[in-house]
Amino acid sequence: MVNNGCLCCTVRGDLVKMLLDLVKKKKDKFDHIVIETTGLAKPAPVIETFCSDELVSRYVKLDGVVTLVDSKHAMKHLNEVKPRFVVNEAVEQVAYADRIIMNKIDLVTEGDLEKLTDKIKHINSIAQIKRAKFGVVDMDFVLGVGGYDLDRIDSAVKVDDSHGGNHHHDTHGHHKDHHHDHLHDSAVSSVSIVSEGTLDLDEVDDWLERLMEEKGVDLYRMKGVLSVNGSDQRYVFQGVHSTLDGCPGKTWEPDEKRTNKLVFIGRNLDETALRKGFKGCLI
Ligand SMILES: Nc1nc2c(ncn2[C@@H]2O[C@H](COP(=O)(O)OP(=O)(O)OP(=O)(O)O)[C@@H](O)[C@H]2O)c(=O)[nH]1
């Protein structure tokens, strides 16, 4: 148990200590460690503990972030307008999730669930969503997620069209689902780019580095599968704020369409600039 039960940034030191204590005492006896934060916790400092603390990252690796959404009350919290510089914790917790459980579905209508799903997908188009009653989901949905695993990015950024989506199969325009514009006013959103073409990897590196330098604070997560020059392998990358990981991935099949797929999740994302940046890397 972390001192005051709250995993905000001020107690991150406690989390590091607790994890290292567990590793020392119970070495090799863990399959997983599950950390439950309070509903008011900011996910970023917890996630960053696993990337940035050298000792922690040596012994444990972050598998994924699961967010449990109360389907009856979530919309109200997601739409809550906070004072300037105050984060909306509900939005943050959806934005950083790899998996989302929409719970208490028995208490709302199908229409409510659809609106909430739209809202969630607008904020975070990468996370897999499952509906549940009393939190019942398969264990596989919450453990062994591989949300930070470069080998599994390919399936993570498969772009989902089922809810009106917020991506384009092209490189133009603004995403808007005209039926639900009123739901999509959150400053935190996802931008997806899906486009064929070959990219210059050096240009991509420069672009992403620049992006992280300039927008690192607002760029919560990004993932991508790219077709790059001089390689028969996909290039996969993933990042959290200003931490970026990239490496060659699976080989493209000879007759496979080499489609680039990138997803960015963040605050006040400039979609036009992101698309322009991407285009600038095309050969
Ligand atoms: N109808 C219905 N009730 C539920 C469901 N899931 C949980 N509850 C009830 O909701 C109440 C509050 O439980 P939770 O929302 O799980 O509470 P919580 O926020 O996790 O509580 P703590 O983490 O202990 O603070 C309990 O009475 C649960 O039985 C559900 O799917 N449907």
Image (tube, grey):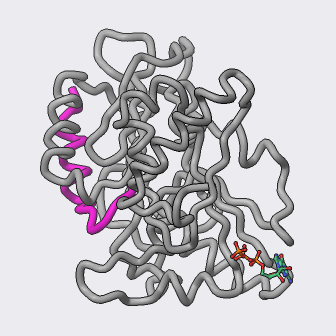
Q: Please state the horizontal and vertical placement of residue 38, each as a whole percent of the image.
A: 57, 69
Give the residue at x 24% y 22%. 201
Instruction: Answer above or below: position of 186 versus 83.
Output: above
* Residue 160 in view: no
Above or below, 5 relative to 222? below
Count of numbered labels shown in the rendering: 0
- Quadrant (top left/top right/bottom left/bottom right) for the N terminus: bottom right
Place residue 215 in its image quadrant. Answer: bottom left
Residue drawn at point x = 23 percent, y = 62 percent:
270
Q: Nearer the viewer, residue 84 or 201?
A: 84
**Per the image, is 269 magenta?**
yes
Q: In the picture provided, is 111 more to the left or to the right than 219?
A: right
Residue 53 picture location, percent across and down: 37, 35
Image coords of residue 19 (percent x, y):
54, 39
Asked if residue 212 lies in the magenta stretch, the reply is: no
Residue visible at 21% across and 45% down in the picture: 212
Q: For residue 266, say whether it is visible.
A: yes
Image quadrant of ligand 1?
Answer: bottom right
In this view, the residue in front, 4 or 259, is 4
Q: Quadrant of residue 158?
A: top right
Q: Camera-side residue: 138 or 257? A: 138
Quadrant containing the C terminus is top left
The magenta stretch is 265-283
From the viewer's perspective, tell me whether residue 230 is left or right of residue 116: left
Quadrant of res 253 = top right
Q: Residue at x 61, y 35 (%)?
A: 22
